[in-house]
Amino acid sequence: MASFNRVILMGNLTRDPQVRYTSGGTAVTEIGLAVNRQWFDKQTNSRKEDTTFVDVTLWGRQAEVAGEYLAKGRPVMIEGRLQLDQWEDKQSGEKRSKLRVVGETMQLLGSRGDGGSGGGGGRSSSGGAQSRPSAGGGSSSQPHDDMPPSPVDSFYDSGPEDDDVPF
């Protein structure tokens, strides 16, 4: 039987990340993510909102980037997998468990001014997408000049010629 374990979450940090290091020197941090859901309740004729709090563990460079650029309130997108942690409570002897997300990729969202007092690191203020040049053919400044343009941006820079259109 096939299985698939993939989670994509977008929300705001509930606390500042605290980076720690294992005895082997690997960075690790645990962040709290608040994910909001809004809906309209027809019975009460009002908008409702529900918040889910999710614990996320980041390892390696992702943990270091989170510690450097993220702060309480900052929006972030995490992609990873679910992991069930199980242990025995030392005081009561009961078996305990907790479901958490192990983050594998992280994308910083918003601009430096969004949310807490943390720095930037997102690719732009439009939620991570790079800006495209205007239709007039001029080029806009890239958020990070040291990054090569994506093929999509190159397409918009040159634009298709009339002979290139297949129809």
Image (spheres, helix red, strand yellow):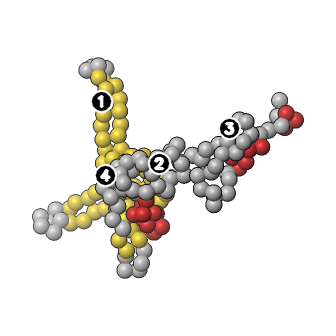
Write down the residue under mark 4.
14
Q: Secondary structure at mark 2?
A: loop
Q: Nearer the viewer, residue 72 or 83?
A: 72
**Distance from the alpha carbon under mark 3 to that under mark 2:** 21 Å
Do residues under tags 4 and 3 come within 8 Å of each other at their CB atoms? no
Write down the residue under mark 3.
134
**Distance from the alpha carbon under mark 3 to that under mark 1:** 39 Å
**Distance from the alpha carbon under mark 2 to that under mark 4:** 18 Å
Q: Residue at x 33, y 53 (%)?
A: 72
Write down the residue under mark 2.
111
Which residue type carries mark 2? Ser
Q: Residue at x 34, y 25 (%)?
A: 40
Q: In which quadrant will I find the C terminus?
A: top right
Q: Could you tell me if residue 8 is visible in this image?
A: no
Q: Nearer the viewer, residue 147 or 47?
A: 147
Camera-nearest label, 2 or 4: 2
Q: Which mark is residue 48?
A: 1
Mark 4 / mark 1, whichever is N-terminal: 4
Q: Could you tell me if residue 82 is visible in this image?
A: yes
Camera-nearest label, 1 or 2: 2
Which residue type carries mark 3? Ser
Q: Nearer the viewer, residue 55 or 99?
A: 55
